[in-house]
Amino acid sequence: MKQIKSPMTSRRSLTGLVLAMAALLSVAATPVAAATDDDSFFTHLHTEKAMANVTVSPGRAGPVEIAIQLETTDETPLAARAVSVTLVDTQSGRKLAPVEASRDGEDSWHVKVAQLTPGRWMLGLGISISEADHVSVESPILIK
């Protein structure tokens, strides 16, 4: 004998399936959301003379490390004489003292900053290419 399902039984099954999918999606999404909290912030800055790939790690409040890779406009390594970093909190106008970057390689530099607060900051690079040639460039960054 064939059993006939009522429309109410079908709705309950569909509701149960939707609730199960929602629970599964919320569990699956939790690690992804937590992982993005520690992501680094990346920006690309450029002028007519130089380009910089800048990574702020981690991209959240607290101590951060800023890695800078310099390139010419032809995308070849740029060997600068010195690099300085300035940071200005765009909301309060508070400006941190400029920090001289340390050389990691021919075109790589890094800076450690003791404490950044959450919000938008203006990151400025002062790049000394030669004694007579100096480039300044800036870009907003976001600290979570």
Image (spheres, rainbow, N blue to C red):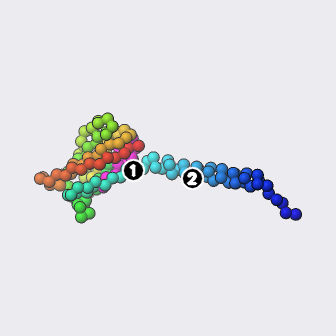
Counting residues from the N terminus, which is met first, the one under dot 2 or under dot 1?
Answer: 2
Relative side of 21 to 116, left or right: right
| Near-viewer residue (121 or 99) | 121
Asked if residue 117 is positioned above or below residue 18 in the image, the reply reads: above
Span highlighted in magenta in the image? 53-64
Please give the residue where the numbered disc 2 appears in the rendered image: 28
Give x and y (percent) for residue 6: 79, 55
Q: Mark 2 belongs to which amino acid?
A: Ala
> Which residue: 74% across, 55% down?
10
Give x and y (percent) for residue 107: 25, 57
Q: Residues within 10 Å of mark 1 (few under 14, many from 20)?
A: some
Residue lying at the far left of the rendered structure = 132
What numbered label is drawn on residue 40?
1
Q: Mark 1 belongs to which amino acid?
A: Ser
State how far apart marks 2 and 1 are (Cα).
Answer: 22 Å
Please name the predominant secondary structure of the magenta segment in the image. strand
* Residue 92 lies in quadrant: top left
Q: Secondary structure at mark 2?
A: helix
> Which residue: 39% across, 50% down?
40
| Near-viewer residue (90 or 39) | 90
What numbered label is drawn on residue 24?
none
Relative side of 57 to 77, left or right: right
Give x and y (percent) for residue 100: 23, 45
Relative side of 129 to 18, left or right: left
Q: Secondary structure at mark 1?
A: loop
Give x and y (percent) for residue 20: 66, 52
Residue 55 within the segment the image draws in magenta: yes
> Which residue: 76% across, 54% down?
7
> Which residue: 11% across, 53% down?
132
State whether residue 62 appears in this view.
no
